[in-house]
Image (tube, rainbow, N blue to C red):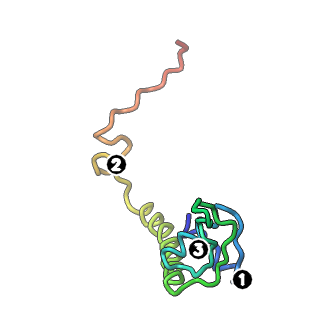
Amino acid sequence: MHLLFLLRLQHVELPAEIVRPEEIKHVSVLKATGLVEAEIAPAIDPSGKFNMARTAIVTAITEDGIAEIMKLRTERMRPATTWRAARRRRKLCIRCGQPNTPVCSCSPAPEPKSSAPI
């Protein structure tokens, strides 16, 4: 989810103020991993109690963040290509790896359906 938020940030004018608690968590993780530059209020107040930050300001996406975005874009394209290639290939049974002809040898034949009421 954090990386999806990073993808969304690339379409936002920076600096951007983030106020939703779940998005602030995303910013916190992205900042900790070095993918964005951000200002987040301290999590501990002067009395030593933990407080959830109410706002975060994302100032920039780092070079590592941009590289991660590019990586995500190429990976998002790859499954569709892989799926098409898999459909072109002959389908194999998940259990035994043999061609899945009408009924695979490792699975029992389906029982015929009768039309007589029970």
* Disc 1: which residue: 13
On screen, 61 above or below 83? Answer: below
* Disc 3: which residue: 6
Q: Which mark is residue 93?
A: 2
Q: Classify residue 45 by image quadrant.
A: bottom right
Comparing marks 2 and 1, which lies closer to the viewer? 1
- Answer with mark 3 or mark 2, whichever residue precedes in sequence: 3
The amino acid type of the residue labelled 2 equals: Cys
- Picture residue at 54% right of the left edge, 85% below the top: 62
- Answer with mark 1 or mark 3, whichever residue precedes in sequence: 3
* Element at label 1: loop
The amino acid type of the residue labelled 3 equals: Leu
**Viewer-nearest residue: 116 or 56:** 56
| Numbered-mark total | 3
The amino acid type of the residue labelled 1 equals: Glu
User: Percent from the top left, x then y, of residue 43?
Assistant: 59, 66
**Viewer-nearest residue: 90 or 20:** 20
User: Percent from the top left, x then y, of residue 115?
Assistant: 53, 20
